[in-house]
Amino acid sequence: MGEFTTTIERRLDQAYEGLKEARCTGDEYLADALSAEIEDLRRLADDHGVPLPR
C-alpha cells in the first residue's frame, strides 16, 4: 500500500470519526463540513484508483 493510499485512508478515518462526534454533539456546521471533506476524499481516491470500502 502506497503512502497516498495510506494518507487517504487515514484522513477518511479521521473525518468519519469527527463526523460521528459532530452529530452526537449536534454541531451541524461541522457535520456538513466533514461530510463535504469525506465526499472530496472519496472522489480523489476514485480518481486515482484507490479502492475503498463502501
Image: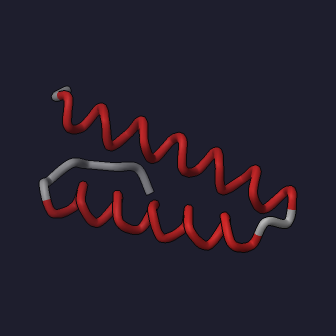
Residue located 34% across and 49% down the image? 52
Quadrant in the picture for the C terminus: bottom left
Please tell me which residue lies in front, 16 or 32: 32
Q: Is 16 positioned to the left or the right of 12 in the image?
A: right
Q: Position of residue 16 (x, y in %)?
A: 58, 50
Please tell me which residue lies in front, 10 or 30: 30
Q: Is residue 36 above or below residue 3?
A: below
Q: Position of residue 43 (x, y in %)?
A: 28, 66
| Residue sitting at the far left | 48
Residue located 22% across and 61% down the image? 46
Residue located 66% across and 66% down the image? 31
Quadrant in the picture for the N terminus: top left
Count of numbered labels shown in the rendering: 0
Q: Position of residue 24 (x, y in %)?
A: 85, 56
Q: Position of residue 29 (x, y in %)?
A: 69, 72
Residue located 37% across and 40% down the image? 9
Write down the quadrant of residue 39 in the picture: bottom left
Query: What colouring method underlies this structural image?
Result: secondary structure
Q: Is 25 positioned to the left or the right of 9 in the image?
A: right
Write down the quadrant of residue 38 in the picture: bottom left
| Residue sitting at the far right | 25
